Amino acid sequence: MIYDLIVIGAGSGGVRAARIASVHGAKVAMIENNKFGGTCVNVGCVPKKFFYYLSQINKDIANYKSYGCKISDPQINWRKFIQKKDKEITRLNTIYENILNNNKIKIIKGSAKFIGSKKILVGKKILQAKKFIIATGGKPKKTDFLEGNKHVNTSDDIFSLKKLPKRMTIEGGGYIAIEFAYIFANLGISINLIYRGKRILKTFDEDIVDFLIKNNPNNKIKIHFEKTITEVNKLKKEYVVRLDDKKIIKTDYVLSATGRIANTKNLGLEKTKVQINDNHSIKVNRHFQTHEKNIYAVGDVIDYVNLTPVAIRQGHFLADKLFNNKKMIEYDFTNIPTAVFTSPQIGTVGLTLEMAKKNKIDAYELTTSFKSMKKTFLTKDKDTFYKLVISKKDKTILGIHIISDDAAELIQLLAVNVVARNTLDDFKKTVAVHPTSSEEIITI
Ligand code: FAD
């Protein structure tokens, strides 16, 4: 049998592409060598968000105490929490499998390897298709010093952490490292964050990142800028981390979150004309087509913007294009909103002033910062900062950068303004909702 489409990888992008292709009448097979749902469901967004929710417990209780409530300190049952998280993920795995089954997609468990441009090998089976979508995602990579070091964990390992340590050392400066630093610091763990650069979250607005750094949960996070880890050894029950300046940090857990690498090894791509970049991601054109014209790729494996909704929309767009291009939705892949689940959270969409300048766009920014009403009795410190980047030419909103306890929820809707090219006047025309924090962005 020759399938119309074989999708490799049942993660965010692959499952969406397979389902939409099947809805359009294509005969589809899905190859998956691990759990259904991919990174997001198993070792990414979903378990991370549960970790984040739990991490807010001390902060929330402190706030209620400031309202005069008497609450005893919480006892976290970490083992029970991990069991509950695992149970929910198993439920989601089944939902993903059911999506495939209900859409009559043939599921084949195993690793796919190309043996030609229209043939793959899965175990001992040869499968043929007219078209292929590679949606194999990525996996954590450790820095060269730490590669192969069994005392060093990655984000894949942390989701099955057996018990909460007292001290944690985290290497990295991207959103995954920073989210874990804030999650565990809020749970009372002392964090040493080691970052090789001068600026964490380097693609984010600088004022927003500075604001985050100032909001250091009980000063539990110590950032070591321009440092790398050169060695990690176990000494009795603790780990000894050595930095490149010879400094020694003693810790109970080491997490390396220094980036991810596309899953292209062992895919047999050398048997096709598919080309890969230096970082192992697959080269595609703007319609997600590789150099082999019947082979396409979406999601983290192409290393464009590595987020679940991006992989989903790429998969959806591609399935529409290949099997029913009359129904195609044109997505805006330039203004992609994103959140960082620190506390406060960061939400961002569109250009920073720095990016506008680089693109020779004449722009200015408006900002406001304040303490949210909820924390009136708790603190004098500001916990919210909003910034709009506006075009000087016609007042179009080019970017929105916010940091607040609910920034992730806010930025989803604020992003519509950037995608729709609304102007500052549209903001001003809109009547505020009072008393809220978000009214401050309307009246900025
Ligand atoms: P994946 O979801 O990785 O799916 C790839 C699938 O292919 C996997 O199931 C894999 O087993 C399978 N596979 C690989 N090779 C083969 C093979 N040879 N044969 C068969 N199957 C194969 N994104 C957000 O939007 N929001 C977040 O808050 C967020 N948080 C994250 C937190 C962490 C810790 C991490 C690691 C990621 C996070 N992401 C987040 C990113 C998000 O998880 C990814 O962008 C998304 O999962 C990519 O989807 P994908 O379909 O490209 O690949």
Image (cartoon, helix red, strand yellow):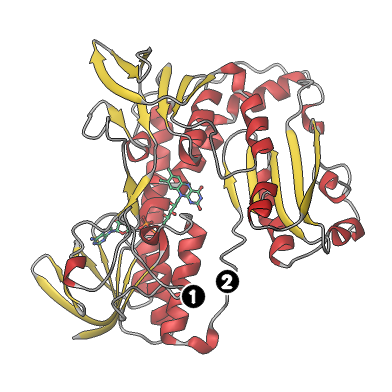
List x then y, in percent, for residue 283: 36, 66
Residue type at the position of mark 1: Phe
Q: Which mark is residue 317?
A: 1
Q: Residue at x 31, y 14 (%)?
A: 240
Compared across the picture, whether 174 is left or right of 6 comes to right
Determine if residue 408 is in view: no
Comparing 168 with 103, the one in front is 168
Q: Position of residue 347 (x, y in %)?
A: 64, 46
Q: Earlier in the sequence, mark 1 or mark 2?
A: 1
What residue is drawn where x is 33% and y is 27%? Answer: 162
Q: Nearer the viewer, residue 136 or 60?
A: 136
| Ligand 1 position by quadrant | bottom left
Q: Could you tell me if the residues under marks 1 and 2 are in contact, i.e. CB atoms within 8 Å?
A: yes
**Residue shown at 84%/57% (left/top)?**
424
Outermost residue toward the left?
Answer: 124
Residues at marks 1 and 2, CA–CA distance in whole angstroms: 8 Å
The answer to whether residue 198 is visible is: yes
25 is higher (above) or lower (below) than 74 = below
Q: How many marks?
A: 2
Does residue 246 appear to the left or right of 212 in the view shown? left
Q: Residue at x 47, y 69 (%)?
A: 314
* Secondary element type, mark 2: loop
Residue 179 location, x and y as percent? 51, 36
Eyeballing the image, is 324 above or below 79?
Answer: below
Density class for disc 1 (Cα within 10 Å; few <14, some 14-19, many ≥20) is: many
Place of residue 410 in the rendered image (x, y in percent of width and height, measured from the top left)? 70, 50
Locate the N terminus by quadrant.
Answer: bottom left
The answer to whether mark 2 is within 8 Å of ligand 1 is no
- Say what amino acid the circle numbered 2 marks: Tyr
Secondary element under disc 1, as helix, strand or loop, is helix
Residue 331: image tag: 2
Q: Residues within 10 Å of mark 2 (few under 14, many from 20)?
A: some
